[in-house]
Image (cartoon, coloured by chain):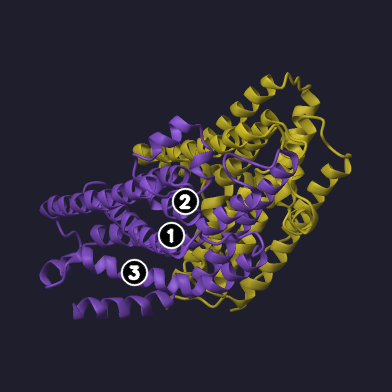
Chain colours: A purple, B yellow
């Protein structure tokens, strides 16, 4: 366990090198967010006051929470690094050391998220402060607790899925197209662009059985008090199941990939 | 490192020389792209997917409203199409080249470009052509044509030419701003974050300007003219221009952006100290 603790510490130091990069990332991503919120405000000003089950404040809160959960859970450099580790033959050393590559990457993902979250506190914090009147509080404390748990599971799910995509580098020369294709689905079916429950009901129902909403949308819907009672339990069960499925899949893909691995360059 | 300043005035014979050069660069790019055909097609598919995603966002919004500002559904679809067209043209001619600037600085390969007897900015900006951009740009035009059909729009030839000219100004704005951001590479070597950031600005270009008021609208028209790039050409087609000064503003802003980026480039290149031995 101790060695992984070291990995986290080293990971934090390494990602701090990218601090300007991260700061720019966090800052720049607020521009389209602001545009989206203003766009919705214009739409609400012309409509009856509700879109789906959302009031204007509810809609603004939705986008603010998406931004927070995204900062806490999104994979950004990890998949590219894993893919290039494989292509450049850097994983050879992990096959010799008493360290598990997946756990190692998970630690690095974790430290990357810590650094990113700390750095985005200032820009995102200011942004949320600007919209503080609109941000609704969670209905009660247990709900907030489940929101945090679900956010952690969302992070695990994002990591597992990206890990598997990156492992395709064992077989493919170029994984970036695959990563971008999956990212497109995550972006729309995960709830990045709009809340999934303003879609026609059958479509929203269908999406609930795909892994994508559990990467981002589900924790936010817990916070907003939309997923409660039986919905909450079923959602958490599905989210946990997806994490487990992708964990097993990741292990299986890794084991197959390793057999194929030729240590180019080494 | 002191540099001979490249000739600033381009005489007719000079112009011909640059044209020949550019033709050679084109040939190179075509050969390069055709070496990795599978990859080339995959990237086109990725772009189509993201375009479809933007259109579905508009589709979902218009499930819940009739208007955004004074824009109706098919007008916004046309705007998204036009924005895609402009962005893809920018991508075809300039994007890869701008992105690679930080790599040229980091590895010191910029040295060789500075030594070549051509204008360095010309060479850096136009080295590679991304052919996929043309395919996807046509798709943007196709979506525009379809939405124009839905709107019952007829476009006389001179209006179409005006539209293309304004799109050109839009591409020029994207290029100048991206080149400006890429030049930051002379100060901090890890400039990818900045380049990535520009994608966030693109997002604004495809939104209808009628949705915005106050500071946001002023900022993205007069400082970073994202709300002009695609909005003005489309407004020309759908007869929505407040007055013809909007077209003038777009052209003036594109020249201003280019001038700022050129000044910054001249200033940055003077700071350049080679990275390699």
C-alpha separation, residue under disc 3 versus residue under disc 1: 24 Å
In this view, the mark in front (2 or 1): 1
**Chain under label 3?**
A
Q: Quadrant of residue B80?
A: top right
| Residue wearing tag 1 | A143
> Which numbered mark, 3 or 1, is in the foreground of this view?
1
N-terminal label among 3 and 1: 3
Where residue B36 is drawn, which disc sits there? none
Marker count (numbered): 3
Query: Which mark identifies residue A110?
Result: 3
Q: Position of residue A188 (x, y in %)?
A: 47, 43
The relative height of residue A94 versus residue B38 in the rendered view (above or below) is below
Q: Say yes or no: labels 2 and 1 on the same chain.
A: yes
Q: Nearer the viewer, mark 2 or mark 3?
A: 2
| Mark 2 or mark 1: whose residue is earlier in sequence | 1
SS of the residue under disc 2: helix
Q: How busy is the neighbourhood of tag 2: few (under 14 within 10 Å), some, or many (20 plus)?
A: many
Q: Residue at x 15, y 50 (%)?
A: A252
A68 displayed left or right of B241: left
Left or right: A107, with B68 as reference point: left
Circle 1: element type: helix
Residue contact between numbered discs 2 and 3, judged by CB atoms under 8 Å: no
The residue under the point 11% across, 73% down is A98
Do we see residue A38 in this rendering? yes
Percent x, y of residue B11? 75, 51
Instruction: List the residue tagged with mark 2.
Output: A221
Pointer 2 and pointer 3 on the same chain = yes
Between A132 and B217, the one lying in front of the other is A132
């Amino acid at each position: 366990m101790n060695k992984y603790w070291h990995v986290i510490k080293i990971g934090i130091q390494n990602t701090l090198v990218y601090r300007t990069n991260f700061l720019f990332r966090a800052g720049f991503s607020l521009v389209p967010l602001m545009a989206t919120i203003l766009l919705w405000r214009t739409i609400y000003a012309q409509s009856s006051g509700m879109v789906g089950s959302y009031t204007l404040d509810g809609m603004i809160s939705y986008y603010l929470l998406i931004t927070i959960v995204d900062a806490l859970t999104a994979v950004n450099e990890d998949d590219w690094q894993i893919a290039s580790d494989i292509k450049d033959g850097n994983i050879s050393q992990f096959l010799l050391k008493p360290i598990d590559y997946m756990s190692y990457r998970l630690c690095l993902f974790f430290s990357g998220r810590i650094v990113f979250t700390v750095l985005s506190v200032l820009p995102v914090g200011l942004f949320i402060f600007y919209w503080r009147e609109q941000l609704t509080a969670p209905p009660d404390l247990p709900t907030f607790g489940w929101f945090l748990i679900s956010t952690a599971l969302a992070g695990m799910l994002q990591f597992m899925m990206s890990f598997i995509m990156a492992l395709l580098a064992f077989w493919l020369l170029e994984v970036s197209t695959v990563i971008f294709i999956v990212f497109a689905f995550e972006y729309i079916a995960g709830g990045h662009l709009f809340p999934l429950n303003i879609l026609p009901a059958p479509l929203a129902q269908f999406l609930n059985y795909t892994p994508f909403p559990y990467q981002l949308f589900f924790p936010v819907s817990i916070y907003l008090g939309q997923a409660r009672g039986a919905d909450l339990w079923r959602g958490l069960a599905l989210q946990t199941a997806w994490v487990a499925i992708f964990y097993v899949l990741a292990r299986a893909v890794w084991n197959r990939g390793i057999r194929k691995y030729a240590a180019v360059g080494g | 490192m002191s540099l001979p300043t490249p000739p600033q005035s381009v005489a007719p014979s000079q112009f011909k020389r640059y044209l020949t050069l550019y033709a050679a660069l084109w040939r190179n790019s075509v050969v390069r792209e055709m070496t990795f055909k599978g990859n080339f097609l995959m990237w086109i598919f990725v772009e189509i997917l993201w375009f479809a995603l933007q259109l579905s966002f508009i589709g979902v919004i218009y499930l819940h409203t009739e208007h955004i500002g004074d824009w109706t559904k098919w007008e916004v679809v046309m705007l998204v199409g036009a924005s895609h067209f402009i962005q893809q043209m920018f991508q075809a001619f300039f994007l890869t080249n701008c992105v690679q600037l930080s790599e040229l600085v980091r590895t010191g390969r910029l040295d060789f470009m500075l030594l070549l007897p051509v204008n360095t900015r010309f060479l850096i900006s136009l080295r590679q052509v991304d052919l996929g951009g043309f395919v996807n740009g046509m798709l943007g035009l196709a979506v525009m044509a379809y939405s124009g059909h839905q709107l019952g729009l007829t476009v006389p030839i001179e209006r179409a030419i005006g539209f293309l000219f304004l799109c050109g100004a839009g591409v020029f704005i994207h290029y100048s701003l991206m080149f400006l951001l890429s030049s930051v590479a002379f100060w901090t070597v890890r400039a990818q974050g900045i380049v990535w950031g520009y994608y966030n600005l693109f997002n604004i270009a495809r939104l209808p300007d009628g949705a915005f008021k106050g500071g946001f609208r002023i900022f993205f028209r007069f400082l970073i003219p994202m709300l002009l790039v695609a909005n003005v050409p489309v407004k020309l087609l759908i007869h929505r221009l407040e007055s013809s000064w909007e077209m003038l503003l777009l052209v003036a802003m594109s020249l201003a952006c280019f001038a700022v980026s050129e000044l910054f480039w001249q200033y940055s290149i003077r700071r350049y100290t080679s990275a390699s031995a």
